[in-house]
């Protein structure tokens, strides 16, 4: 059995930017936790799945993804869940909210994957750059520094990504193309 989650990953140049911010937090504020996964927006929080049934999980996700249109995403500034999390702010659009809700419903009805915590709070899309090991004093110091800092990216996400935990970090297991997208397009 392994831990998995489903996310949207931005294009490589935005991942590179987010990873630079994560490295800044590691260097200046001793917060390295966010470096244990690629920059992402979580759609289905972590769950445990039998490794032997991975083809079933991937097939279910591919069926879902193939029915979804690529999604336009916007990163706009920084945000925080005080006093422990700093993130790149993802603009919460109806398309993004619907995609997340539909995915969770699909996984619940087809595979019995349910995240009880996610069902009790509203979806808050974000791209974490520091969390868990960010101390409260470092949170307040870094938030004062970043709160007004500008950043803006717009991009289209063409696939869902299934990530697996290898015991140390989260790694891409598979990318599941959305409707009207074939690998090789951008």
Image: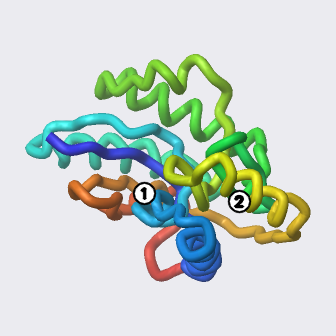
The quadrant of the picture occupied by the C terminus is bottom right
Q: Residue at x 29, y 27 (%)?
A: 111
Q: Secondary structure at mark 2?
A: strand
Badges 1 and 2: C-beta atoms under 8 Å apart?
Answer: no
Residue beneath label 2, please?
88
Q: Earlier in the sequence, mark 1 or mark 2?
A: 2
- Tell me if I can see residue 26 in this picture: yes
Q: Residue at x 37, y 50 (%)?
A: 62
Q: Residue at x 34, y 58 (%)?
A: 170
Q: How many marks?
A: 2
How far apart are labels 1 and 2 at the CA level? 19 Å
Q: Residues within 10 Å of mark 1 (few under 14, many from 20)?
A: many
Say which quarter of the image contains residue 23.
bottom right
Q: Position of residue 93 (x, y in %)?
A: 77, 44
Q: Secondary structure at mark 1?
A: strand
Say which quarter of the image contains residue 176.
bottom left
Residue beneath label 1, please?
161
Q: Position of residue 166 (x, y in %)?
A: 22, 58
Residue lying farthest to the front in this orientation: 137
Q: Residue at x 45, y 19 (%)?
A: 116
In the image, 155 versus 25, the foreground residue is 25
Q: Which mark is residue 181?
A: none
Say which quarter of the image contains residue 40.
bottom right
Q: Position of residue 15 (x, y in %)?
A: 57, 74
Residue 109 drawn above or below residue 138: above
The quadrant of the picture occupied by the N terminus is top left
Residue lying farthest to the right in this orientation: 148
- Tell me if I can see residue 11 in this picture: no
Residue 23 drawn above or below residue 35: below
Viewed as shown, does residue 31 lie left or right of 58? Answer: right
């Amino acid at each position: 059995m392994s831990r998995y989650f489903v996310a949207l990953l931005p294009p490589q140049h935005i991942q590179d930017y987010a990873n630079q911010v994560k490295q800044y937090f590691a260097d200046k504020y001793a917060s390295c936790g966010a470096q244990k996964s690629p920059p992402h927006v979580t759609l289905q929080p972590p769950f445990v799945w039998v490794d032997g049934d991975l083809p079933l999980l991937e097939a279910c996700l591919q069926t879902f993804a193939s029915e979804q249109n690529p999604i336009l995403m916007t990163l706009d500034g920084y945000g925080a869940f005080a006093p422990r999390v700093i993130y790149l702010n993802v603009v919460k659009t109806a398309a993004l909210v619907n995609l997340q809700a539909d995915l969770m419903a699909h996984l619940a009805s087809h595979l019995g994957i349910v995240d009880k915590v996610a069902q009790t709070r509203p979806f808050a899309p974000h791209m974490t750059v520091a969390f868990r090991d960010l101390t409260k004093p470092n949170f307040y110091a870094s938030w004062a520094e970043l709160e007004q800092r500008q950043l803006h990216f717009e991009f289209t996400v063409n696939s869902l990504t299934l990530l697996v935990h290898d015991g140390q970090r989260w790694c891409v297991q598979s990318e599941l193309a959305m409707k009207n997208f074939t690998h090789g397009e951008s």
